[in-house]
Image (cartoon, rainbow, N blue to C red):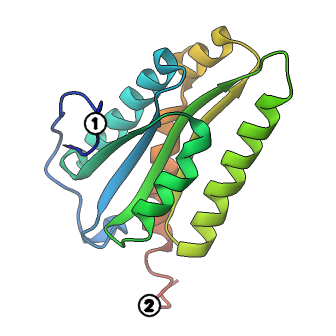
Amino acid sequence: MDSAATGAGAAHRGGSGGGAGDGLGGRRIAVVVSRYNESVTRRLLDGALACAVERGLGDRVSLYWVAGAWELPVAVRRLVSGGRYGALCALGAVIRGETPHFEYVAGECARGLMQLQVEYGVPIGFGVLTTDNLEQALERAGGAAGNKGHEALSAALDAARETGGLDAGTP
């Protein structure tokens, strides 16, 4: 894994690589992680990295950190617009507080990431938790409810594989 931004931590290495049928077209995978609520997002990241390794793509992951969920769409836009990545995954945790701030951050983050996915035609896994409290977030970041980071990257990789033949017109 290429640790491509400050604060990204130690690099992890995984399997040797995926193949022509992975839908990535030889491109890399970007995982963009929010530092806000890091006790949750690090667990989501662990799940996403485990997914990449399970699929033999651990050596094709580039990791980027941003301040919070609000910054995820702008970072993902910079990455997806360069054409280097065949799939991306955005990870974050927005936990409800006592003000409507939660709705704005969560909604605009989701809208921005979906808009980029449609505009660029590159799958972006949505691993941004929106929960009422920290306990719910931790349950979804490797607890009893699974790991949504793993699920988000898995969905993006599946979408890359499933849509990879659409340009060629193959069923």
Can residue 55 be seen by looking at this rendering? no
Q: CA distance from mark 1 to mark 2?
A: 38 Å
In the displayed structure image, the side of residue 108 where residue 137 appears, left or right: left
In the displayed structure image, the side of residue 40 where residue 42 appears, left or right: left
Q: Residue 137: image x %, image y %?
A: 62, 18
Q: Which residue is mark 1?
A: 6
Residue drawn at 44 percent across, 80 percent down: 165
Above or below, 77 relative to 164: above
The crowding category of the residue bearing disc 2, from other C-alpha atoms within 10 Å (few below 14, some 14 to 19, many at least 20), is few
Instruction: Inspect the image, locate mark 1, and give the three-letter code of the amino acid beneath it.
Output: Thr
Q: Which residue is mark 2?
A: 168
Q: Residue furthest bottom?
A: 169
The answer to which quarter of the image holds residue 117 is: bottom right
Residue drawn at 23 percent across, 48 percent down: 56
Can residue 62 be seen by looking at this rendering? yes
> Who is closer to the viewer here, 58 or 71?
71
Indicate the secondary structure of the residue bearing disc 2: loop
> Who is closer to the viewer here, 138 or 171?
138
Mark nearest the camera among 1 and 2 is: 1
Instruction: Inspect the image, locate mark 2, and give the three-letter code of the amino acid beneath it.
Output: Ala
Indicate the secondary structure of the residue bearing disc 1: loop
Q: Which mark is residue 111?
A: none
In the displayed structure image, the side of residue 97 where residue 164 appears, left or right: left
The answer to which quarter of the image holds residue 87 is: bottom left
Assign the N terminus to one quadrant of the image: top left
- Mark 1 or mark 2, which has the lower sequence index? 1
Q: Residue 144: image x %, image y %?
A: 58, 14
> Who is closer to the viewer here, 109 or 163?
109
